[in-house]
Image (cartoon, helix red, strand yellow):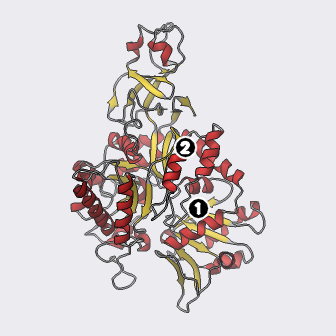
Amino acid sequence: MAGCGFSGDGVLGGAVAVAVRGDRIVWTGPPAALADAVAWSGKEPCGVFEGAKNAMAGGASLPVLEFPEGFLMPGFHDAHIHMFHTALYLSPLAERYCGENEADAVARLAPLAARRPEGGWLLTQGWRDYLWNPPVAPTKASLDAAYPNRPVAMYSGDAHTLWLNSCALERLGITESSVPPAGGSYDKDASGRLTGIVREAAAMQLMPRIVAEFPPEELLDAYRGLFAQLNAEGITSVCDVSLMALPGLDFVRDDLYQQLLDAGQLTVRTHLFPTLLDGSDRLAQLQQQLNHPLLQAQGYKQFFDGVSSQHTAWVHSPYTNPRFPGDNGRPTVEPQEMRRLLAKAHAEGQPVRIHAIGDEAIHQLLDFFEEEAAADGALAEPRNAIEHLENFQPADMGRLARLGVVASVQPRHITLDPGGPERDLGPARVPYMWPFRTLLDEGATLAFGTDSPVTATNPLDAVYTAVTRQDADTHQPEGGWLPAQCITAQEALRAYTVGSAAAANRGHELGRLAPGYLADFIVLDRNVATCEAADIQKACVRATFVGGRRVF
């Protein structure tokens, strides 16, 4: 098939071929090894082999796709993506941008307001006040001045905060006397008036009501567009993880997936992770309903804290720039309740994916997993994962590896907030931020993703950042941020294939070029495992296959 490749475990030197029967790989190796079974008609023995049944039986006809200069590897698997929001914000239904400042963010609403129905919601995602000039939190006042009579909802870039105008607050029924759900807040000014900023669980609770106005066919079109983009970027699998911490609000849209699967339009292998809740049977229902190789429900997702930039990630010692005495962030679920929820999932034999960014959230989760392992006398199977893991207590890096917990991380988070870790956590904690090199050296399994729409879906940008510790857009800082934590390109590719398959608990059949594995693979125009780091982002996807079917 190609001039060289990567199996998921290492680089494949020389020409390499793959034979496919149905949706599975049945043979891999050098093309010349099939010479006695295939009439090559003078062609150089280098190609993707479809119709492998004929080849293995010695048949004379064999469809061949050839990429003599290509690089063959398993398809990229985004281990942490929010598909509904990614599809929505990449579609004409909404806009996605950060803006230069509050006024600029409001001004950029104009094209969306012009194309959306009068009186309907104006929805955006991407603002980050700490990147603005000046870096101050916005309020409803600026939105009210521009849009006094239609609701506006602007979701932050980290997907944890909503910025609403007065019309939106009124439509949602939020007043000064409203009580936010546990783990959330409605911000107020010094006089007790709502500012329009809604955080964490409160924001998550409101989003489903906001997007309920969008017609189903428009949402299906948004998903189709997203699938096409992912396939063009070499993405063959995703883990669609719940973005909500509340009942019935997970945004894992099995209804849309089922319609697309039935229509033959599901071109990304999808693994669903709805919210872990007490007394909920949603996961069991999904697992009974969805048993297709392309669409499965694989476990639970829950939140244990927030994000460092908003001081809602739960840290052991107070933030270096505290907003009040004892500013340590907070758990979004009380620790004893989290312990009980994890015990429930463990008793059901279901894996969990838990959002934990701060070092104390990570530490206590590892305590819980360690208790489970001690009770069972063995590491938990199927494998659990912790999501994001930005800031470690030093001893916990080795403990995570010993417990077999997958580190589901997003490389582009490293450079989202230049100077932010130093500002919020101080120099003593900075060396333990996103410690990919240390985690691998300790024996941990890394799974890579993007957390899209928080960062863009392009996997090559994420690989570049993991290898260089530089931002994929600005290529800064020079020399990389904490360069001792750089990993190799092969290690990054393994995290995006084998590691992500482990996070989906499908490592036995996904993520490798090997007989018996699902035929999900891609061809790039260069060897990204060995090329210069500066050339990784220059690679182009020439072909994408899902289950042996060419989808790009």
Name which of mark 1 and mark 2 comes first in the sequence: 1
Label 1 vs label 2: CA separation?
20 Å
In this view of the protein, which residue sits in the foreground, 180 or 321?
180
On the image, the x and y values in percent for residue 292 come to 53, 39
> Is disc 1 placed on a helix, strand or loop?
loop
Task: Find the residue positioned furthest to the bottom.
Answer: 191
Amino acid identity at mark 1: Tyr
Q: Which of the two discs, 1 and 2, sits closer to the camera? A: 2
Q: Residue 92 versus residue 465: which sits nearer the camera?
A: 92
Residue 350: % across, % down: 39, 52
Residue 11's spot in the image, x, y percent? 33, 31
Q: Is residue 469 visible?
A: no
Under circle 2, the secondary element is: helix
Q: Amino acid at mark 2?
A: Leu
Q: Which residue is mark 2?
A: 230
In this view of the protein, can residue 124 be seen by the observer?
yes
* Residue 202 drawn above or below residue 432: below
For residue 295, the mark is none
Residue marked by disc 1:
97
How many numbered callouts? 2
The vertical placement of 5 against 110, above or below, is above
Q: 510 above or below 297?
A: above
- The x and y percentages for residue 88 are 62, 56
* Residue at (68, 66) in percent of width and height: 122
